[in-house]
Image: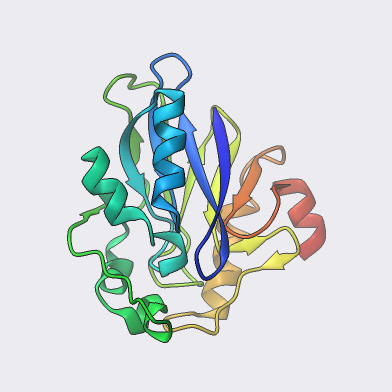
Amino acid sequence: MVKELQVEGVFLENCYFYIDSHSKSGFIIDPGAQAGLILETVIRNGWNIEKILLTHGHFDHFGAAVQLKERLGTPIYIFPSDAPYLTNPDLNLSGNYPNPVIVSHYEELYDNEIIRLKSNSGFYLKVIHTPGHTPGSVTFWSPEEKIAFVGDLLYQHGPGLTNFPGGNRKELERSIVDKILTLPDDTLLLSGHSSPISVADERNLLL
């Protein structure tokens, strides 16, 4: 089960819950802001959050992560190439605003890693390293549910931005073509700042 929750700090951003409906356990993906609202949603639904997963290291995707980690006792995971972003406000872009955001304690995840629930090993996400927006941008893919959480790699209207520290247009385009558009056509792409779009429709838009 996927639930989208729009949260707003400096920017409006899509935070996602990926929850096993049987065990009510699951993951939070990209908690960008409004930790109280996210926590309220978790408590109201009786969910057990096992991991906080970050698609990349920009603050509008992890602004609420530390508060949630403290309240839920849940570890934060990021790809190693983006780990420096968590502790550097200039890289994570929060340095441009009054309240810089830093995450000091985190775990690392890796390309092709399978992230499983402890309570249900059949419920999982696969990590796909999709650099370009940042060096360590990743996509979390569920073949079973036919969904992929793509962060800011791409949007309903086209490719993501590359004009931030570590951005690389050629890498981003390669990630989209080689790793996203090769997923099954009916896979739904869930991005950080737009509505969902299928792989088939995104391919028609881009190619």
Q: Position of residue 147 (x, y in %)?
A: 59, 38
Q: Is residue 185 left or right of residue 179?
A: right
User: Residue visible at 52% across and 73% down?
Assistant: 171
Rendered image quadrant of residue 39: top left
User: Residue visible at 26% across and 25% down?
Assistant: 118
Query: Can the viewer see residue 75?
Result: no
Rendered image quadrant of residue 54: bottom left
Residue that extends furthest to the top in the rendered view of this protein = 22
Q: Is residue 76 left or right of residue 130?
A: left
Q: Position of residue 186 (x, y in %)?
A: 71, 37
Residue 140 to residue 89: above or below = above
User: Residue visible at 43% across and 57% down?
Assistant: 55
Q: Is residue 167 left or right of residue 207?
A: left
Residue 103 to residue 185: above or below = below
User: Residue visible at 48% across and 79% down?
Assistant: 167
Q: Is residue 174 left or right of residue 197?
A: left
